[in-house]
Image (cartoon, helix red, strand yellow):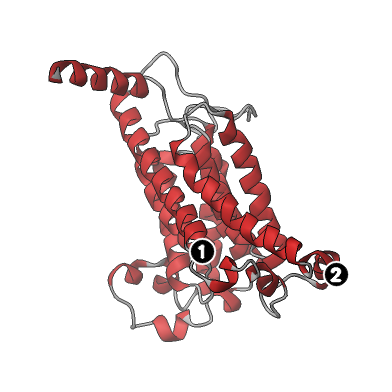
Amino acid sequence: MIAQQLQKIDKFALGIIQNSPFTNVYGTARSILALGTCLTLIVNPVEHLFFASSLARMGNTSGLFTISLFTVLANHLELARMLAIMSLLLVISGYRPRLTGILHWYITFSFYADCSDIDGGDHLANVLSFLLIPICLTDNRTWHWQPTNSVVVRELPNLIAWIVGLVLRIQVCMIYFQAGIGKIPVEEWANGTAFYYWFTHHYHGADTWLKNLLLPILQTSWGVVSITWGTIIFEIFLFLAIVMPKNDKRRHYLLISGLIFHISIILVHGLVSFFFSMAAALILYLRPLDKPFNFKISLRT
């Protein structure tokens, strides 16, 4: 009986590692993740991003924080910003993921460690870029947009990438678990009024044009309760996607819905960089790694 069970497990594992996870799925997620950090560095003046770095952080760091790019170059922050932007552009291009995987994490970590005003998206970008390193190191392609060689099966790299992919999915799953379940004990979310307060908040709330558009709905009990509780229900659905079969079509619909959901967060709260981190997370979570997107990018190897 035990031997039969082990044979089934062995057959199942072999079936998995025969399929290569090195497709444009994880490549697309990498590029989107790097794009969010890159745009933040491009559109914001360096003194707005790191105004505390050159003073408070110099000589006041420990552990990994001492190797941060913006700590090492604390007296040359504009140079550090340009180096970070160029590095992230290289990551976005998809060139040599084996070489740029660690570089991507280092730049993202440096931004997370030293930026004076970060949000959850920056934290998530740091975590995801770190977890992607083993996949990058086992990816021997010139560009992460290229299709995998279907003739040669690289069992050990495939196994490593599939295991890391599962860890990534669990990480994103727990984000939505916390986002959905964690709201329930909060009185304003439980009674269905929380969205009204966040929507009309003087700093984090929506712009005037959007307030004028939606306030008539939010000032009705059915409107504000539907949106507030609908947010919780949707996040719980995303959490439950972890148990959906690999080829379940609902994954595709949840991916599209999740992207629209986070676009709406941009409109209400203006969290642009947060969108890029969550978009990358949703792709890694809901799109099977061995099911490449249909778009093609012509590249010379």
Tag 1: amino acid: Ile
Residue 174 against residue 68 in the figure, above or below: above
**Residue 206 visible somewhere in the drawing:** yes
Residue 165 against residue 56 in the figure, above or below: above
Query: What is the x, y in percent for residue 46?
Result: 58, 74
Query: What is the x, y in percent for residue 105?
Result: 42, 54
Task: Give the mark nearest the N terminus, 1 or 2.
Answer: 1
User: Circle 1 — which element?
Assistant: loop
User: Circle 2 — which element?
Assistant: helix
Query: Which residue corresponds to the image point at 60% horizontal and 41% vertical from the top-left?
Result: 255
Q: Circle 1 sits on which residue? A: 184
* Residue farthest top in this picture: 151
Q: How far apart are marks 1 and 2 (CA)?
A: 28 Å
Query: Which residue corresponds to the image point at 53% horizontal and 33% vertical from the top-left?
Result: 24
Query: Which residue corresponds to the image point at 40% horizontal and 33% vertical from the top-left?
Result: 139
Query: What is the x, y in percent for residue 104?
Result: 45, 52
Query: What is the x, y in percent for residue 103?
Result: 42, 52
- Tell us which disc is closer to us: 1 or 2: 1
* Residue in the foreground of this view, choosing between 49 and 174: 174
* Residue in the foreground of this view, choosing between 104 and 13: 13
**Mark 2: few, some, or many residues within 10 Å (few <14, many ≥20)?**
few
* Residue in the foreground of this view, choosing between 43 and 187: 187
Tag 2: amino acid: Asn
Q: Circle 2 sits on which residue? A: 212
Tell me where residue 31 sits by quadrant: top right
Q: How many marks?
A: 2
Query: Which residue corresponds to the image point at 74% horizontal and 66% vertical from the top-left?
Result: 221
* Residue farthest left in this picture: 2
Q: Do tag 1 and tag 2 residues touch (Cβ < 8 Å)?
A: no
**Residue 91 visible somewhere in the drawing:** no
* Residue in the foreground of this view, choosing between 247 and 34: 247
